[in-house]
Amino acid sequence: MGALMLQGTGSDVGKSVLVAGLCRVLTNRGLRVLPFKPQNMSNNAAVTVDGGEIGRAQALQAIACRADPHTDMNPVLLKPQADHTSQLIVHGRVRGTLDSSNFRAARGTLLDKVMESFGRLQRACDVVVVEGAGSPAEINLRAGDIANMGFARAADVPVVLIGDIDRGGVIAAVVGTLAVLDTEDAAMIRGFIINKFRGDPLLFADGYQAIEERSGWRGYGLIPWLPATSRLPSEDAVRLERFAAREEGRIVIACPILPRISNFDDLDPLMLEPAVEVVMVPPGRPIPAEAALIVLPGSKATLADLAEVRAQGWDIDILAHHRRGGMILGLCGGYQMLGTRIADPLGLEGSPGEAQGLGLLDIETVLTAAKALRPVRGQALSARFDGYEMHMGETSGPGTARSFAKFDDGRSDGAISADGRVMGSYVHGLLAALEQRAALLARLGATSSGIDYAASVDAALDEIAGALETHLDIDGLIALAMEGASA
């Protein structure tokens, strides 16, 4: 069956969104489509139907295909940790840890795993839409590559290169990519797309033509800036500080940007609420004193991020907020930080050690090798929710007697302080449930807009797909996917 790969001239050029949009376009045309990313590096992940985890972007792309997320869609996932290492996830399960000394050699051995997953996806659909990572122009990373040209050549998948005009220098970025690639890698690229254009397309007509002439590649379209992307789940930390703007007259919900923050898309549903201003607090700034709620987010390295909370003085802000009567919600790693103690005796997140927590919940956590990966549903704050668990560690203590949530399978989750103002939970995706989000906002004295988050995401995907239908040569891309790179 057919396949097409989108690579970029750099990171954050829009690959993930365009793959999702193209998946929705082809799905709307009646094709059976599945997404694929050979190797991803992200601390934002989602649980799959087969009990593993993949990058959040591939889970969104599965939604765009109206398919269930599966570990084959992202066979290799690297999750950066605190000490310049990354947790290695293969086919959805923890395989070990990589660092600079073994990274290149280890990833090269994973090509067989990548090809197994790709083969299974190809047999299950009409078209696989593949996302690259970073840029093929990073030729210093070419040896052992499985994310870009290493995969494209092994699988014989044609590549379309994406350039981001919004950051400037897009002609040099596209043509320069050709200049640094070796002949065989360059031969895999069959065309280009220019993304994030603002203004009159006629103003770039000469530039578009110059790229075609200098590269010899066919242009497949010029995509305008797509406002609907802001309604999609966040995947990359580079987007976080864009949420730091303030607006008056709203209830402030503040979240510190931890160095190893993970699954920060948990907060995205709150950004749809007109009554709420979500303030992502970057390093070097205090948590706003007027915040009604502080959210401590997930973390890939809880002990290291807890140390950073103290280094930034955010612990002082959090404790002062609590003394003033403010509310605090800890999610996953943030929940662990709210306890009295966190221990990592096996060195799962770095060097073995332990630290005193913030002491706002009477719990303690010991990190263990077993990783909880499962969808969950239940009730919390007298409201229903659907979400998932994705964490390492066992949490216990008197505080768990006042649990935050009760799962439908009878298990309890999380803790609530005796004063009811500090809450912690291991559930990700909690606030995507309208009923649950409304219950939380009611505690803050606000009324939910009633916006269905899942419906909003789906509508954004359709809006993006409509723009791609208008501005891309979709028929040409389909033909390219079906004919293969070697045609």
Image (cartoon, rainbow, N blue to C red):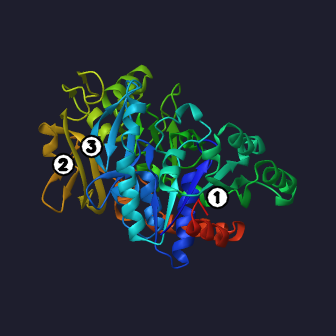
Which residue is at a point 48% across and 55% down the rendered structure image?
Answer: 155
- State how far apart marks 1 and 2 are (Cα): 40 Å
Residue 79 appears anywhere in the view: no
Q: Secondary structure at mark 3?
A: strand
Q: CA distance from mark 1 to mark 3?
A: 33 Å
Amino acid carrying label 1: it is: Pro
- Which mark sits nearer the N-terminus, 2 or 3? 3
> In the image, 237: left or right of 395?
right
Q: Are marks 1 and 2 in contact (CB under 8 Å)?
A: no
Q: Amino acid at mark 3?
A: His
Q: Is residue 370 left or right of residue 295?
A: left
The spot of residue 418 in percent (x, y) is: 20, 41
Task: Indicate whether 78 appears above or below 406.
Answer: above
**Closest to the observer, 471 or 118:** 118
Position of residue 381 relative to residue 264, above or below, is below
- Crowding around mark 1 (Cα neighbors within 10 Å: few <14, some 14 to 19, many 20+) is few
Is residue 311 visible in this depiction of the protein? yes
The disc labelled 2 sits on which kind of residue?
A: Ser
Identify the residue at horizontal 62%, vertical 70% (top origin).
479
**Which is nearer the eye, 428 or 109?**
109
Secondary structure under tag 1 reads helix
Residue labelled with disc 3: 391
Percent of width and height locating residue 437 = 38, 58
Q: Residue at x 44, y 50 (%)?
A: 38
SS at mark 2 in the image: loop
Placement of 171 over or under 448, stated as above or below: above
Image-quadrant location for residue 442: bottom left
Looking at the rendering, in which quadrant would you find the C terminus?
Answer: bottom right
Q: Are marks 1 and 3 in contact (CB under 8 Å)?
A: no
**Mark 2 lies on residue:** 403
Residue at the extreme bottom of the image, as rendered = 30
